[in-house]
Amino acid sequence: MSPRAGSAGQPTLAFVESPVQLLNVLEWAHAHALRTQGSGAPERGASIPAQGGPRSGAGRTAEIGPGAAGAGRTAASAAAPSAAGPAREGLTLVVLSPTDPMTRGQLRRMAELARDEGHEVRWEEARGGAAAPFRTVGGLTRLLRQARRVVMGDPFSRYVQLLLTITRARELVVVDDGTATMEFVAQLARGERLVRWHRKGGRPGARDLLFAPVSASARRRLAPSVRRAVEVFSSMPIDETPAGVTVTVNDFAWTRARFGPPRLTKGADLVGTSLVETGVVDGERYLEAVRALAAAHGARRYFAHRRESPEKLHRLAVEVGLEVVRPDLPLELIARRGPIGRTILSFPSTVVHTLPLALVGTEVRVAVCDIDPAWLTDRASPRAQGFLSGVTGTARDVDRLSAVGPADSPRSASSA
């Protein structure tokens, strides 16, 4: 990689579509600055204190208690941070905003953090009507042609793939978009077309066929060559590294430097997943598993995934009796700021890899519960069970829990 994040007229452009992607761009920028400055100690910036108190609040949350209405009540929002840290030269973050209100809210909060770090943030209403994609791409074309480096959070995104066909950047960086990064690197190494793991095995639709030439062009650009360097910045376990790709470890140094350590509470917290919403896991089986886990571990709070449906969350609150928390920041930041339970329970997901890194040096225990094959729906990809088992099996510094049913108690398995 070159010694500068960008130079006049040749900025580094980062494209993000989710809060986690934006967080990992901030982690990349922090790690890149440390590498290029030759400094062994990060420069501390401002953390976000909870309004009216110490920085231990979980941010702005919608809390749904037993018997509460579906939307719940909103807690106080975190106050604005104080003075920002030093600017990182030449990084422009482009937010390709989705339409989901929960995701948009988290992205706006993450955009505040990025500006506090000295980065420029450009918010694009990329999905605001039929003309929005043409407006967005047209407005970004000049920047794309000038950029010497492009950082992206989701190489599977059609938007990102389209933008890749325009750029002349000599350096491409892929930061984590959760467990999808594992699949992306494996597909790139095998020369396969880029398809999200939960869709693989299905027949391509009309839109897939129409977009196939763009996707193929993006895949070729993501392969390193004498004219283009490719880096993957990841906290995920990567077994198949494509030839010529540089893999850099994301150890959440920025998160740990800016937040915490957290105050710990008694008992356990549960982390939600969108496996029901993506059609992988049956909704009733999921509800039963959450109920069994909560009963066995004394969990009272459920940190919702931003894609979970209000109907499912309402049932978890009313039927299971959990306090459903909808965080306004990625869970890694929420957990690092605290308060957080001494045990965090999760199904196979990104957090079983990222939370142990973000919470290193604390006494928090992360435990992952396997997905029983009987929970999978008829719509689930043939690869779903193997992929989810791989997510669990490759996680480090977590405890393994057997799959649970309505009458089961989870039994601890070997630590991963």
Image (cartoon, helix red, strand yellow):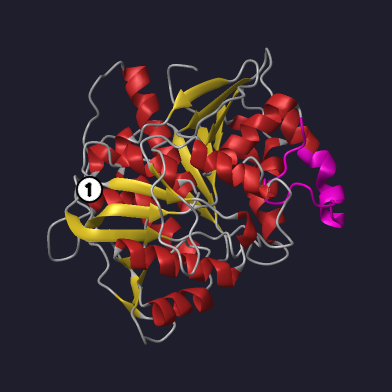
Residue found farthest to the left: 53
Q: Residue drawn at (69%, 56%), measured in percent from left and top?
A: 133
Report x, y in % for residue 367.
Answer: 37, 48
Measured as percent of width and height from the top left, residue 215 is found at: 77, 40
Q: Residue at x 86, y 50 (%)?
A: 210
Q: Residue at x 37, y 46 (%)?
A: 114
Residue 266 seen in render: yes
Foreground residue among 354 and 42: 354
Percent from the top left, x then y, of residue 101? 50, 69
- In which quadrant will I find the C terminus? top left
| Residue 10 visible in this rendered orientation of the protein | no
Q: Nearer the viewer, residue 43 or 311?
A: 311
- Residue 142 appears left or right of 312: right
Residue 231 sits in which quadrant?
A: top right
The reply, left or right, for residue 253 in relation to residue 338 is right
Direction from residue 206 to residue 277 in the image, left or right: left
Classed neighbour count for the residue bearing mark 1: other residues with Cα under 10 Å, few (<14), some (14–19), many (≥20): many
Image: 238 above or below 277: above
- Tell me if 366 is positioned left or right of 155 in this view: left
Q: Is residue 211 magenta?
A: yes
Residue stretch in magenta: 192-215
State the residue position of label 1: 47
Quarter of the image where one finds residue 46: top left
| Total tally of numbered discs in the picture | 1
- Residue 245 coordinates in the image, percent (x, y): 60, 20
**Is 131 rendered above or below residue 348?**
below
Please report the residue visible at 64 percent of the width from the left and 43 percent of the height from the top: 386
Within the magenta stretch, is there residue 407? no
In-front residue for pair 73/1: 73
Of 218 and 304, the residue lying toward us: 304
Judged from the image, the secondary structure of the residue bearing numbered disc 1 is loop
Identified by mark 1, the residue type is Ser
